Image (tube, rainbow, N blue to C red):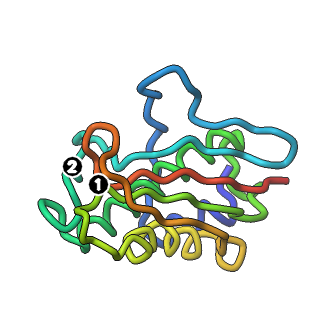
Amino acid sequence: MAGRIDARLKELAIELTDPATPAANYVPYVVTGNLVFISGQVPVDATGLPFRGKVGDTISQEDAVKAARLCGLNILAALRQACDGNLDRVTRCVKLGGFVNGTPDFDQHPAVINGCSDLMVDVFGNAGKHARFALAASNLPFDVAVEIDAVFEIA
């Protein structure tokens, strides 16, 4: 059933894949009441993990923004599953939490996480505007450049 958000994704030339299988003992999302908590998503795609390394060293800031956007796409894939395939149920992106695997002198974490934040606004409009944090991490699982989790409100 194609809805308003599906039409917007098509307009943006975004095709969501199925969510990745969790790498440990957790679930991709939890729905409680009208909130969906999406587990931390890494920049994984059909090729594997294309953005591995430290931002400011082996990963450029530009590529880190792309990695954050890919995390956002994976968030949307899990969210779609949590919403039984109907992203029109989303009433608000409440919060994003972003971690950037950067060198000690890299300080543009917010600019990197904008790759995901901008995607949420592109897809959901004003309902995509959210609270968030963007933090440095000395390392992340599988040496990925970025990991992002999310909270959404649904109807």
Foreground residue among 73 and 63: 63
Which of the 4 image quarters holds residue 99? bottom left
Position of 1 relative to 114 (above/below): above
Secondary structure beneath dot 2 equals loop
Q: Which residue is mark 1?
A: 145
Crowd tier of the residue under label 2, counting other residues whose Cα lies within 10 Å: few below 14, some 14–19, many 20 or above:
many
Q: Which residue is mark 2?
A: 52
Identify the amino acid type marked 1: Ala
Q: Earlier in the sequence, mark 1 or mark 2?
A: 2
Question: On the picture, is 21 further left or further right than 91?
Answer: left
Badge number at residue 84: none
Query: Residue 109 location in percent, x, y?
Result: 39, 70
Residue at left offset 70%, top offset 39%: 84
**Distance from label 1 to label 2 (Cα)?**
5 Å
Question: On the picture, is 89 further left or further right than 131?
Answer: right
Question: On the picture, is 139 further left or further right than 116?
Answer: left
Identify the amino acid type marked 2: Arg
The outermost residue toward the front is 104
Is the residue under label 2 in contact with that under label 1 (CB below 8 Å)? yes
